[in-house]
Image: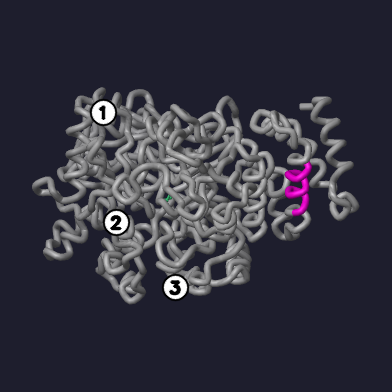
Amino acid sequence: MYEQVSHSLLNQILEEIKPEISKRNLLRFYTRLGANFYAIHSLFTQLYGERKDFLEQMVRLVEVLATRYIERSADLEALDIEREHDHNWFLAQNWVAMALYADGFAGDLQGLQHRCAYLQELGINMLHIMPMMKCPEGASDGGYAVCDFLDIDARYGTLSDLQTLTAHLRKRKMLVALDVVVNHTSDQHEWAVKAKQGDKQYQDYYYTFPDRDIPDMFEETMPEVFPENAPGNFTFDTSMNRWVMTVFNNYQWDLDYSNPAVFIEMADIILFWANMGADIVRLDAVAFLWKKIGTTCQNEREAHLILQLMKDCCQVTAPGVLFIAEAIVAPVEISKYFGEDAVIAKECEIAYNASFMALLWDAVATKNTKLLSQGIKSIPNKLDRATWLNYIRCHDDIGLGFDDADIINVGYEPYPHRKFLIDYYTGVYEGSPARGQPFARNDKTGDARISGSLASLVGLEYALESNDEELIEQSIKLILLLHSIIMSFGGIPLLYYGDEIGTVNDCSFMQDENKANDNRWLNRPRIDWQKADLHKQHGSVEQKLFDSLQRMIAVRKSVPVFADFNNRELIDTDNEHLFIFIRNHFNQQYEPVLVVCNFDNRPQMLNLSELGNRGLFELGQLRDLATGESPALFKDQLVIPPYRYYWLTVQP
Ligand code: GLC
């Protein structure tokens, strides 16, 4: 949109900009800046329009965007241009991601490069490397307490190792996602250190207060994220003699985005990592970016404005780079991080589908899919040009964040139902083979979340220990069933390292005083490569899982209707053990695929006539794409064995 006020401001900025920028020929930069400037200016005005130094701050922002653009390599710029032409590229079915810690997976970045062949063999082509920016020795919340945003922690290697790795991956058409912890810094970050020394400029980067007046007002409505380890949302800093907002751990200081200097620093940092070769930047804890007294300080409107502004800025300098929103909040809130009232993503192109993940775990424990189906209906439709990250496990706990209304709607009661799930996954419930642990139990609210690896939560750890062959087979089937859903549902499947070989809980964290009080470390394993190599040994658990997943990934990549174009329809039937949906292609060019999943430990039947006039499945011979075989039918009833999934098409 052309708008005179923005345009004349842009001209004024260009006159004031540093000569080392203004003298250069930056044609592409200026066309993008022109195209995005109206939005950047409006958002900057909404957030910071009242400030006397508004123009100065805007000049500084444009200088940052230009400086990072000048620094961007020719390789990366070529990718930017390619992706501008093919802007739906990330919705295709060929992407399959894995999240991993470089040290846990392979020692360090060089080790990770060495292990790329293993990932490629499995079919992974998108790597989310968990945070590796410089952190203090000791507790660092798994890398989420950063003390230098522009350097790699020596534990993982060097910046040059990372650049070598990203170039290596680029050649193999593999993408890299890197974390940027936008909401807070470590209390040992240079900004915090200066704040502690009394430097007012840096105290203004954080929320600090001389007494408890304002903190107490905040506390009235702010929930606690880590009620056991870090109760309350403020920490008293003795050197500064002030209270500082610390929503997560007491050593993680929340940044104050009402200060434009903070926004500009973070834009600079994000673009720095984009230039290091990140194709995707995972923005951590985005729901928390704006704090307001009288609210939960989550999902505030300004948090969305900040993300929109960040996206517009990134579009000017590194338009090929995507954002992932890590917002583990209520189902109706999550999809807002794509940006509302738009067709293309205005904030983050990708968001964690945390609601879907939790619902899958509900279906496993109950062997019933009614809450899963109901919960999915409550997740708002995504925008056309945005997509979900569908996952089963990650490095964090599982929060049972489904909607109470949905729980009631399907006939459960919220409190006892959540209690059942916690008891089930922590093995307290009689007959449960799960080996999880409760995380962040809150005695005030009765809430808890769940830690534990996928294999341990589905019963594989218990089955292996008790040498129960039947339970081992059942756990393997469950692991595959869950993966079959994230691979076919629409969105990018995000596997978690170690799950491809059934890695059980890692209890070694108990020996480390900096980790012992945080049982999320159960599911942040160090891969034992001798054990991992068993995936080559026929008949081993590792081989059964690895080979099946490898095949599943290869099939996913070959099925065009698995691309994410809002081309999914859920199918309700009378059988509550089954989860069924159909994937169509938006232009009918490709055969639809019917996905049928049985969450029960007994065989189930599906009347094909229940599929209504989608009944093309009655016509021909059905074929399961996953195995290449025809499934068993009794008259027009499809038989689905326990914990089995089908990806069905009609045999031509
Ligand atoms: C995100 C991370 C989590 C971390 C938190 C605070 O939720 O996934 O591991 O503890 O942010 O940084």
Mark 2 or mark 1, which is nearer to you?
Answer: 2
Q: Marks 3 and 2, how far apart in space?
A: 21 Å
Give the class, few, some or many, for how many residues have Cα within 10 Å of label 1's Cα (few <14, many ≥20). many
Residue range corresponding to the magenta coloring: 59-67
Look at mark 2 in the image and give the residue it sits on.
519
Q: In this orientation, does residue 92 appear?
A: no
Tell me the amino acid under the disc marked 3. Answer: Gly
Position of residue 401 measured from the top left corner of the image (x, y, whole percent) = 33, 36
Along the line of sight, the residue nearer the viewer: 70 or 369 = 70
Look at mark 1 in the image and give the residue it sits on.
407
Position of residue 417 measured from the top left corner of the image (x, y, whole percent) = 20, 34
Earlier residue among tags 1 and 3: 3
Along the line of sight, the residue nearer the viewer: 618 or 641 = 641
Q: Residue furthest bottom?
A: 530
Question: How has the structure been colored for display?
Answer: one colour
Q: Marks 1 and 3, how far apart in space?
A: 43 Å
Q: Residue furthest left?
A: 430
- Determine the residue positioned at 33% across, 69% down: 535
Look at mark 3 in the image and give the residue it sits on.
107
Along the line of sight, the residue nearer the viewer: 48 or 473 = 48
Dot 3: what SS? loop
**Could you say which quadrant of the image residue 473 lies in?**
bottom left
Q: Marks 2 and 1, how far apart in space?
A: 27 Å
Is residue 392 rendered to the left or right of residue 350?
left
**Majority secondary structure of the magenta segment?**
helix
Mark 3 or mark 2, which is nearer to you?
Answer: 2
Along the line of sight, the residue nearer the viewer: 652 or 418 = 418
Q: Quadrant of the C terminus?
A: top left
Give the class, few, some or many, for how many residues have Cα within 10 Å of label 2's Cα (few <14, many ≥20). many
Whether residue 65 is in magenta: the answer is yes
Tell me the amino acid under the disc marked 2. Answer: Asn
